[in-house]
Amino acid sequence: MGSLALSRVAAQDPAPTIADEVARLARQELAPIAAAVDAGSVYPGEFLHRLGKVGAWSSHVPQEGPADLRWAIQSMAALGEVCGATAFMAWCQNTLVWYVANSTNMKLAARFGDCFSRGRVLGGTGLSNPMKSFFGIERLKLKGRKVEGGYIVRGALPWVSNLGPGHYFGTIFEREDEGTKGEPGGIASGEPGSTVMFLADCSDPAITLTPCKPFLAMDGTGTYGVQFRDVFVPDELILAEPAAPFVKKIRAGFILLQAGMGLGLMKDCINIMDEVHAPLGHVNRYLPQQPLQFRELYAEFEKEAMALASDPYNADDSYWRRVVALRLRIGDASVAFAHAAMLHCGARGYLMSHRAQRRLREAYFVAIVTPATKQLRKMLADG
């Protein structure tokens, strides 16, 4: 992992070896199928299960209070250096684990904690719409009403990733049976009722998964539109009620874990520029941005990510703004790194067989996945 290895702060801690093992598996097993995952002909479910067996989904689980996201970010960066789509699915799985690990529903935690963190069951995060909603960009798309033993939920989410038969994901509905009650720290727009965060079971017959239209990149990510047709959500699947305080607790981790996607992609873009130095260095030296500059910027991002990731429950506003600012810079920089890699490659990077064009397409995803760079700018502006 190159400079990532320099960030390890406890050589005696066994956790750092997880990123090494993930990197080895990525080179040996993921690299041969990366193009197929990008094209959508392969969903790497078995590989994701295998990553769970080596601890890729468990290193960030809180231990008697504190949590540390550094090893999880390093593992995702190792995947992202090979395949951006798989790094994104790793973020989905890690975020699902993060939800359950922070829930106070002990029955839920006992039932799902190990099976998610060990990769026996896969899943994703359905917080794209809720995260926009909590920051005043759109309204919640799911509605629920209280019934005996749980809730009845209806509505639709346009895109949820890392899904399939037997998968789970976390998302949020607004209680339509509580009128305009609202909740502290809740949705920023309109006059909402209270909100509830829950686990959705893709095997429920009242939940329909509809394949999405082809994307620009990363089609093998198990991304579906999800329709809820009066789904009964039992109390045993409630992650948090009300949802807003829970989201405030997990939001830094939710965003920081995305750093792994960008760091891995940027690292490979530097690799690409280095690879073409011998044949093209004599003319590439006239380009305004060079690998040395990108290596220095990468080191800066990595240092800040590791510092923030060691303290994800920090409630200070200044810490939260650092998290948002770092995520914004990583989104912008991912596109800049990939753009430079394409220019350094020249015509050879324009071939579909060359990964430079894939990295550029993946980089745009890092910039637009929730929270997108425009939402991050809004969040900083709103204070």
Image (cartoon, rainbow, N blue to C red):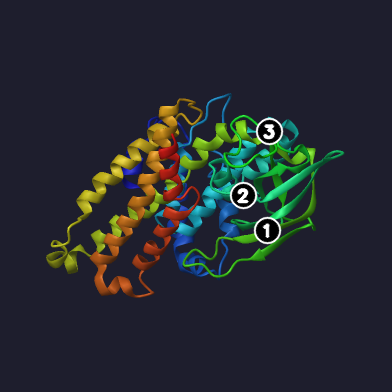
347 with respect to 308 (left or right)? left
Q: Residues within 10 Å of mark 1 (few under 14, many from 20)?
A: many
Mark 1 in CB contact with mark 2 (< 8 angstroms) = yes
In percent of width and height, residue 99 lies at 61, 39
Q: Residues within 10 Å of mark 2 (few under 14, many from 20)?
A: many
Quarter of the view holding residue 300: top left
Height in image: 342 above or below 382?
Answer: below
Mark 1: which amino acid? Val
Q: Nearer the viewer, mark 3 or mark 2?
A: 3
Quarter of the view holding residue 210: bottom right
Mark 3 in CB contact with mark 2 (< 8 angstroms) = no
In percent of width and height, residue 79 lies at 45, 53
Residue beneath the point at 31% across and 43% down: 3
Residue beneath the point at 55% across and 64% down: 220
Identify the secondary structure beneath mark 1.
strand
* Residue that numbered label 3 is attached to: 242
Structural distance between the alpha carbons of marks 1 and 2? 10 Å
Q: Nearer the viewer, mark 3 or mark 1?
A: 3
Residue beneath the point at 49% across and 59% down: 85
Q: Specify which label sits upstream in the sequence, 1 or 2.
A: 2
Q: Does residue 60 appear in the picture of this structure?
A: no
Q: Does residue 174 appear in the picture of this structure?
A: yes
* Residue that numbered label 1 is attached to: 226
Mark 2: which amino acid? Gly
Identify the secondary structure beneath mark 2.
loop
Height in image: 359 above or below 235?
Answer: below
Residue 126 numbered mark, or none? 2
Q: How many marks?
A: 3
Height in image: 253 above or below 159?
Answer: above
